[in-house]
Amino acid sequence: MDNAIYLVTLVGTGLVVAAAFSSLIAFRFGAPLLLLFLCIGLATGVDGLGIEFDNARLAYFAGSLALAIILFDSGFGTPLNALRQAAGPALSLATIGVIITTGIFGVAAFYLLNLSWLESALLGAAVASTDAAAVFFLLRAGEIHLRERVRSTLEVESGTNDPIAIFLTITLVEIIAAHTNPKADALAANLAVGFLINMGLGAVIGVLGGLAIVRLVERLNLDHGLLPIFVLTLSLMVFAAAGAVGGSGFLAVYLAGLVAGNSDIRAVTILKRFQDGMSWLAQIIMFLILGLFATPSQFPAILLPAILLGLFLIFVARPLAVWLCLIPFRLPRPEVAFVSWVGLRGAVSILLAITPLLGGLANGRLIFNVAFIIVLVSLVVQGWTVGPLARRLGLIVPARLGPLDKVELELPGSAHHELLAYRVAPGSPVARGERIPRWARPSLVLRDGRSMRFQDMGRLTAGDQVYIFVPDRYPRLLDKLFASRAMVDPEDADFFGAFAIDPARPAAELEAAYAPGLTEAEQKLTVAALVTERLGGHAEYADRVMIGPIELIVRDVDEKGRITRLGLSFEPTAPVARVPVFLSAGEIADRIAAIIRNWRKPAQTQATETKPDETAPEPTAQKAASES
């Protein structure tokens, strides 16, 4: 018995260490880290080193708890401004997009596999949602500086689409296990009612649970070492309570994290660090267990149709669902194309594919194997190409800040102040004499091993360590002041235009100088208001607007999203690949209007055409010649 305990502990910790070590390879070569986790699990499973693990209930239980931890951390780290910015597109993809993907993929699965219509829809529901862990890692580990709108849309979608996919999957498993064959209208009605109840209860419990977590943390004076464990336990209680009353536990735990992370919760720095580590551990354990549960020797029998379904999901089902969901929003075609491509499948799809086994379905193992292969295809095909595609579509923007050395220190007993430690970087604004704002209170400076008051140090120099008291939720202006200049790639040297233009100047000056063809109403606006209007009411860093012969580029915005710096170029400085599909609603309307104008023009020309010898005035040159 003792030897068994030691052996299990040795093998388990060895797998976690191997998975953690593989992260170095992934960060170094840009490989999909979650694919490495899965491969480690496969290599040590029954067809690898021979470790047998065939407990579907234990795999589903461990995977569900790990997913709850990941979703709470995802919600905790999602700022409200990102949610507001991407709420429309992301929530449309997370709800309607999952349903459309399920339907389109289910049709293909029905014709490629020996499954019924309900079983095909079940497989489609299992692989319909994107994986939050895969998306977050690829966008973060690859150091891809995407436009904020695109990044926020992908992160919010991947964090909110799991509950819908889980509801569809579990509901279809229950219907198939009951051996009923409901009519389409009855099935749709049951799904709609069950969805509203499931999501409604999950949302209510999640919001109330998040508020309760914040209140308990503020009221109880817990030790800092115990506080993160207390918060994590409360989040799992919210998850379990929502599921126990028939709600979506996964939606509840995500919303609880969202509420707690965007409130004035105490010790937020400590909580973020602890939850980041727990989220990594949850991902490793979940992928290793799912890899161990798979049986690769069963894959060859369904390998070809599974690969075809994986490619169909990547190139047809997901892009079509994204395009349909994003038609109402004025997103450029390259952004829509990128969102459709970064729809990676991961542990959630494999976890949901276990539910048919738990339900005792005859084709449960077939559905699980096909879903597992689809996840592998997604991670291989899409995981390796995210960075190159973003560059190809012109979605990469230069970094806003250069290297920054900052440490956030939590103040004991204070929920509304923080202590920041900055190291002055060479070439940073403060090293060049820029003043620190009044709301920040520098208290101590370390220089050459000596500590002195800030007031006695004079001008800050490179290498100084500065300790500053700031209010919580402090503006990110301090980061800009203490960061060194960003190193701009030579290819991006002209990204923001060769000339600077004052955003507060009237747009009429642009018309007078460059004649871009502005309307009278547009000439009455400021240049910043003109650019914001052309961008649909919201401007962000690195946005671009073509106006006649000139291009205006947003160089910076303030905390409220107002344009503070603009660049001007006479030539497009960042050519964007033209994607032949993914037209937005605005582009569709413009093209229809152009077709109507072109259709009416010949009729108007024919109606107004007159004989030259009757009404046409005599050319000036000919008239002068005749008079002479």
Image: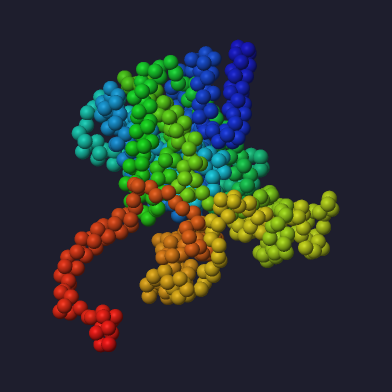
Image position, residue 177 (x, y; %)? 30, 25
Residue 171 drawn above or below residue 620: above
- Residue at image coords 22%, 28%: 181
Work out whether residue 210 can be spotted: no
- Colour setting: rainbow
Looking at this view, name the residue that lies furthest to the front: 628
Q: Residue 260 or 600: which is nearer the viewer?
A: 600
- Residue at image coords 55%, 62%: 498
Image position, residue 517 (x, y; %)? 39, 70
Left or right placement of residue 31 versus residue 346 in this view? right
Q: Quadrant of the N terminus?
A: top right
Q: Residue 282 or 594: which is nearer the viewer?
A: 594
Image position, residue 336 (x, y; %)? 39, 48
Residue 326 drawn above or below residue 127: below
Left or right placement of residue 433 versus residue 26 in this view? right
- Residue at image coords 47%, 49%: 394
Q: Quadrant of the C terminus?
A: bottom left
Quadrant of residue 272 within the rendered picture: top right
Q: Residue 366 or 185: which is nearer the viewer?
A: 366
Work out whether residue 74 can be spotted: yes
Q: Residue 12 or 62: which is nearer the viewer?
A: 12
Q: How many marks?
A: 0
Residue 268 drawn above or below residue 191: below
- Residue at image coords 77%, 58%: 461
Image position, residue 97 (x, y; %)? 35, 43
